[in-house]
Amino acid sequence: MTDTPIPADEEPLVLYLLMRSDLASMNTGKACAQAHHAGTQMALKDFKGWKVTHQNWLGRWQREAGGFGTVLCMGVNERTMRAVLDVAARIDVPHGIVNDPTYPLIDGDVLHLFPLDTCAYVFGPKVLLAAATHNLDLHP
């Protein structure tokens, strides 16, 4: 028996969330907030500039699993995050980076707020994203 390819419009769609795990200050609460920022940025802002095919993927993904399309949160350092985004750009899939303009860092009694790229995402058919995500591990 041979495997029958899945039609492109039925390929499983996945959102890979690339969460920075190289920041000691990125506690669970901050990571949850940044993850929400990534989803909001993707669904409410970035998608407006996507190709129609990519926008259709988003619509299908949003209808999957009762409105909860598959999301895989991967732990990455900054270098890996940028390398994945470079591959995503080359294979022409939706991707984006979250820059928190007021990322909070407490140093003793002083609160610093500064811009920081905290996480990113890549989105599309899982089989297509394998080129960008094959060496990633789930976030701890």
Image (cartoon, rainbow, N blue to C red):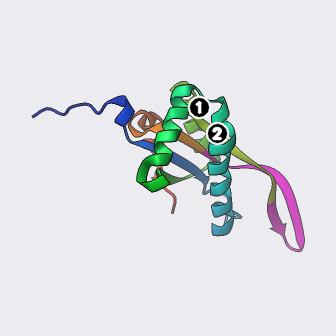
Extreme residue in the left direction: 1
Depth check, front residue: 82 or 34: 34
Circle on res. 6? none
Depth check, front residue: 131 or 93: 93
Q: Amino acid at mark 2?
A: Gly
Give the spatial CA distance, label 1 vs label 2.
11 Å
Q: Which residue is mark 1?
A: 86
Q: Is residue 93 visible?
A: no
Quarter of the picture holding the N terminus: top left
Q: Is residue 112 magenta?
A: yes
- Disc 1 residue crowd, few under 14, some 14–19, many 20+, Cα 10 Å: some
The residue at 62%/56% (across/down) is 35
Q: Is residue 10 visible?
A: yes
Q: Position of residue 38 (x, y in %)?
A: 64, 49
Residue 127 higher or lower than 66, as above or below: above
Q: Position of residue 109 (x, y in %)?
A: 89, 74
Magenta residues, start to end: 104-120
Residue 108 higher or lower than 67, as above or below: below
Q: Position of residue 101 (x, y in %)?
A: 82, 50
Q: Quadrant of residue 51?
A: top right
